[in-house]
Image (cartoon, rainbow, N blue to C red):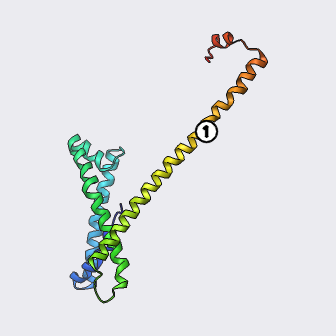
Amino acid sequence: NIIGSGIFVSPKGVLENAGSVGLALIVWIMTGLITAVGALCYAELGVTIPKSGGDYSYVKDIFGGLAGFLRLWIAVLVIYPTNQAVIALTFSNYVLQPLFPTCFPPESGLRLLAAICLCKCHLGLALRMASLAFLVVYTSLVLLPLPLSFLPSFFFFLVTFQFPICMLWTNGFHI
């Protein structure tokens, strides 16, 4: 998730519709102030409700569990995927635009490159998760025999110094 990724999409439209550079700058300054006020409100929520979970915990604490649950599912099923799709389409537009300097890039090319970007990102995440699982299993298998390697030396210590087992049991050490 990239905060503020709209800056890569909208400058062209703002400059075309504003009519002048000065008016476009005024629009950017006004929207920047509105965004700063929104960020301050979000920071105030973070200070007032000091819990992990972001939007979910804020909505859950203010409006109840059902609203928090719905907010979470809307974010997972609608907001995050569309945000990633817009970022991928913007990226593909910027990559393909130099190849078509006199016209717009074909829609099929934009969509194909965006789909490749999305699949590449999710494939990379899947590969990272698989490598993490392999690392955990491998490390567990390597470290598992380590405590067992101390058992022979412990029993050698018991036999060498002739500690009776009942003495260890009565002193609170349980074998």
Q: How many numbered markers are drawn?
A: 1
Above-or-below relation of 20 to 116: below
Q: Picture coordinates of residue 112 (x, y %)?
A: 32, 72
Nearer the observer, 11 or 156: 156
Q: Picture coordinates of residue 173 (x, y %)?
A: 63, 17
Task: Please state if 94 lies on the left or on the right of 150 as rendered.
Answer: left
Q: Could you tell me if residue 7 is visible in this image?
A: no
Tell me which amino acid carries mark 1.
Answer: Leu
Q: Give the labeled residue for mark 1.
A: 143
Outermost residue on the right side: it is: 160
Nearer the observer, 171 or 54: 171
Above-or-below relation of 167 to 46: above
Nearer the observer, 142 or 47: 142
Above-or-below relation of 55 to 166: below
Q: Picture coordinates of residue 74 (x, y %)?
A: 24, 52
Above-or-below relation of 65 to 96: above
Image quadrant where residue 111 sits = bottom left
Q: Picture coordinates of residue 81 (x, y %)?
A: 29, 59
